[in-house]
Image (cartoon, rainbow, N blue to C red):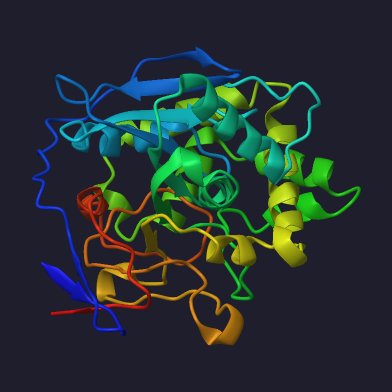
Amino acid sequence: MTWKTSTRSEVRLSDATLPALDGVLPPWPGEQVEGVFVRTAPGPQGGGEPAVLVHGLGGASTNWTDLMALLRGQLDSQALDLPGFGWSPPPPNDRYGLGTHVRAVVRLLDAQDRGPVHLFGNSLGGAVCTRVAAYRPDLVRTLTLVSPALPSLTPRRVADPRLPLLLLPGMSRLASRAMARRTPDERAGAVMELCYGDPSSIPEQRRQEAAQEIGRRSGLVHADRAFTGSLRGLLTSCLERGPRNLWRQAATVQVPTLLLWGPWIGSWTCHWPPGPGGRSPTPGCWCSPGSAMLPSSSGRRRSPGPSWRCGRTLRTRAPHGPPRAS
């Protein structure tokens, strides 16, 4: 398949064939590396190109389990738990601004010294990866953003209507207590209803894993601080101006970039907040039916179900505008 952009340039997708998933896989094994928990899905024998995947707000490295399995024929993939999430400990200073998460990713990439990686980010992870690619282009080979949490004036749905109260001084503790009254199953179900076009397609094992993780984290002292602090840090980053503005930083990214973002990606639509001059400030954006959609906090339902099309984009060149199929 070939895509044509508004500048008439052509972008060819990878010809790699993705394997079918055989049942529901358990989470990939992991270990603590440079202050964060990292899960690894080894690539093909002889080594694959390195990839690092960064989850969204309230997520964990396990969000990427199936995609990592599908990409094993091409990539040696690692997914990390951001500080305070999943199995990663809280940061020493207990601060959860966007910079904390960016530094955690950069520290991991520097320490492992695997060369530039294919960097994937969803929601909060998309904002983190955008800043990493802007600050340290030497660490990034390609950038794939799934519903990145970049500034937008478009109202967004949330899994719990009380979530915005976490941002109000004096209200965060009350809101946290009210949200905690919901059972782990209810909270996991609300997130899946929000993020998947067809929640019934999610295997029961994945639902149980999500609920178990919510239940486990509810007993951690730092869990609420990690979520609330990261949410506030994300909002603060959205209000920044000048060179630290996320859209300005996105405009400086030079590596090939795939952006999956829109109210109905499965219906060939793509939306982003306009940058300077009304143009997309990212190096490129295209969307295709059946694109893989991971849990995010970015709004309306999207694709009818995960068919993992985005795993076939690793060898594309970055287009310069919204594409059309040919």
Q: Where is residue 83 in the image (x, y as percent from the top left)?
A: 63, 29
Q: Position of residue 18 (x, y in %)?
A: 12, 43
Quadrant where the N terminus is found in the figure: bottom left
Q: In this view, does 277 lie to the left or right of 38?
A: right
The residue sitting at the top extreme is 31
The total number of labels drawn is 0
Q: Position of residue 105 (x, y in %)?
A: 56, 33
Quadrant where the C terminus is found in the figure: bottom left
Above or below: residue 93 compared with residue 143: above
- Asked whether residue 74 is in view, the answer is yes
Work out whether residue 162 or residue 68 is closer to the camera in this orientation and state it. 68
Q: Position of residue 196 (x, y in %)?
A: 36, 56
Q: Residue at x 39, y 68 (%)?
A: 284
Q: In which quarter of the view is residue 206 placed?
A: top left
Q: Residue at x 60, y 66 (%)?
A: 247
Above or below: residue 285 compared with residue 18: below
Q: In which quarter of the view is residue 267 placed?
A: bottom left
The residue sitting at the right extreme is 170
Q: Which residue is drawn at 46% across and 49% down?
A: 122
Q: Is residue 218 left or right of residue 12?
A: right
- Asked whether residue 82 is in view, the answer is no
